[in-house]
Image (cartoon, grey):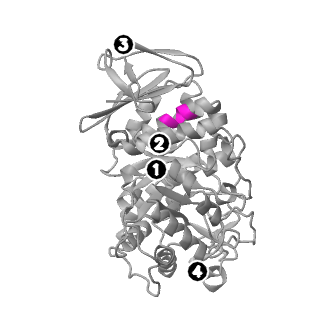
Amino acid sequence: MQHTNRMFILGISILCAFILLSCKKDNTEEVIITEPAPMPTGYTQYGSPMSNVPLTSDIIMYEVNLRAFSDGGDIQGVIDKLDHLQSLHINVIWLMPIYPVGTVNAINSPYCIKDYKAVAAEYGNLTKMRELTTAAHERGMAVIIDWVANHTAWDHPWINAHPEWYTQDANGTIIHPAGTNWTDVADLNYDNHDMRAAMLDAMKFWVLEANVDGFRCDHADGVPFDFWQNTIDSLNSTPNRNLIWLAEGERADHFDAGFHMAYSWDFYTSLDNVFNGTSAAALVTTNATEYAAMPAGKRLLRFTTNHDETAWNATPMALFNGVNGALAASSIAIFTNGVPLIYTGQEVGSTVNTPFFSNSTIAWSANPSMKAAYQSMLSFYSSSPAARSGALTTYASTNVFCIKKSLNGEEVLLFTNVRNTAQNFTLPSALANTTWINALTNEQVVLGTSIDLAAFQYLILKL
């Protein structure tokens, strides 16, 4: 999405739910596709589909802002830094939009797409995209691409060839997405089934011709449930494919449609609030609320930033008060029941707002100790089934976030001081007088009845 506005997204979610409920009162007005649409033909599978696509519970995702990730701002820059991503134990690479950008009414947003089946010249070409997926797969990394199904550029060929594929006002004029200020894009009309088929066809192109492993679906709340359900079912039927589906949205029905993951905006907001004075116990409440009705096997994407937040809000360095605070916040986001997301430059403590409407290269040499801390934390997370999928026990506190995760006899314990001052945390009886191993240093840690934590210190223990 070009500029996240959580209140707006919430409003859209409520509106969509209201519309769906209203339609169900009159079955003659409801549009339902009960069977997957016929698969498009004419494409061939490039290379071999990835055979070891990570399970949702095992994903460690990295969001690549192509315009910032390398000096060239292109796909080759990602290929050149695969060693770096591997050092962070990343197993899913999410590329922000790679398509040609429109120029009519445009502001150079990568979410203003002129052609769904092409790579923008600024990023490379289809051959280069194939090189990336092949190289990533050889390292055990899946590649997913941003998909923008809600709108197109004003100079997309569909505008002139198929104006009926777009939402129009009473005068027959194509409009931008209602309720937004996204005047650089034209809203698509999901009542038109030819448009739906063309959208599915374009997504199929990337699965086969570029060998991508799934999609991060932009502004998923702005696209009807039945389109997502039909499209996910159809693409999942592609032979030998195990596709990854991430919804940028908050609608509960995304999981019913087949998405594996959705955004955890509430947890991000709670993190921000907690590091600015709210009780750390609020994170326990938020996590429980978000997962209260979660279908089995589904996860929420947990993050301390992403492209919208770093561009328009602030970086983790600003939000969480420097290197130590940013790492402390990440320890919570990584270990608390979600899919961890790392965004371009987060691992080296980028301190400036990073745009994605223009090029701005990250200072990769900054804060090497911070990068090492992320590598160490994510190395343990990736190696520990309990850290990724253990049953969660929480211990509420005002200034210290404390959880235990347990799976098949393995236990992981996290203490995180959410304050910029030293804290003493009285241990609950279940943790008092126990002996652990520091998961990052392998040193023995003997707990008494309380523990002292330095400002923004996090401690990861294991049994």
Of all residues shown, which one is farthest toward the left?
Answer: 408
Tell me if I can see residue 111 in this picture. no
Span highlighted in magenta in the image: 327-331
Which residue is disc 2 drawn over? 378
Nearer the observer, 253 or 314: 314
Q: Earlier in the sequence, mark 4 or mark 3?
A: 4
Q: CA distance from mark 1 to mark 4?
A: 41 Å
Along the line of sight, which residue is nearer the eye, 276 or 165?
Answer: 276
What is the CA distance from the residue labelled 4 to the residue labelled 3? 70 Å
The disc placed on residue 42 is: none
Residue type, label 3: Gly
Residue 10, percent from left and from top: 52, 49
CA–CA distance in space, label 3 to label 2:
28 Å
**Crowding near the residue tagged with mark 2, few <14, some 14–19, many ≥20 C-alpha atoms within 10 Å:** many
Q: Are marks 4 and 3 in contact (CB under 8 Å)?
A: no
Which residue is labeled 3 in the image?
448
Cα separation between marks 3 and 1: 34 Å
